[in-house]
Amino acid sequence: MIRQELGRGEVIQKQGKAVRLLGDLDPRGKMARVLVEVIDPLDLGRAEAERRPLLLGSYVDVVLRGAVADRVAVVSREAIREGDQVYLMDADDRLVIQPVDIAWRGRDEVYVASGLVGGERVVTSRVPAPVVGMLLRAIDESPIEIPTAAVEAPR
């Protein structure tokens, strides 16, 4: 769905679909760019007096409906280390470096498709010189949860 707020509570809404992911990033926000095809952007399907067209170059909000992700773990962005790895604290409070497969990256959280199981303790704080097996000290004991049912990916 494409929404454009005109002010004074007036909103234009149109239907559309994501056509493709563009190959470049927005230079200011480093966000991915998506090409969206808007169905009837000029509102030609309505009577002329009722038309509310989207103008070329207008800024709009786009809501994309995503696929359903099956059994993913949601972790904070800080938990993902270089090379798509996660630091874990084992039962003996020792460091384990675990490679993971990322299903989706959001602004604040990352959906991990594989590499984690429920109940693991993820290290989110900075570890200056990480060495597998080094002793760690827990600050917050919040193990990750992996849902038994599918969850809907962010929109």
Image: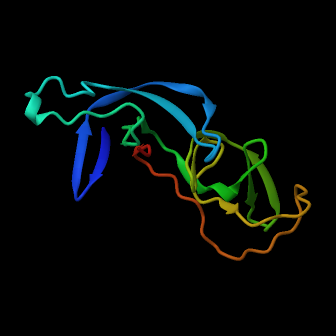
Kindly identify the residue that appears in the image at 60 percent across and 39 percent down: 26
Which of 11/51 is in front? 51
* Image colouring: rainbow
134 vs 6, left or right, is: right
Q: Residue at x 44, y 49 (%)?
A: 148
At 72% from the left and 43% from the top, the residue drawn is 84
Above or below: residue 124 compared with residue 71: below
Q: Quadrant of residue 140?
A: bottom right
Which quadrant does the N terminus fall into? top left
Viewed as shown, does residue 54 lie left or right of 19?
left
Q: Is residue 45 left or right of residue 88?
A: left
- Residue 141 x/y as whole percent: 64, 73
Q: Quadrant of the C terminus?
A: top left
Q: Nearer the viewer, residue 41 or 135?
A: 41
Q: Position of residue 121 (x, y in %)?
A: 67, 63
The percent position of residue 89, horizontal first and vertical second, equals 75, 62
Q: Quadrant of residue 12?
A: top left
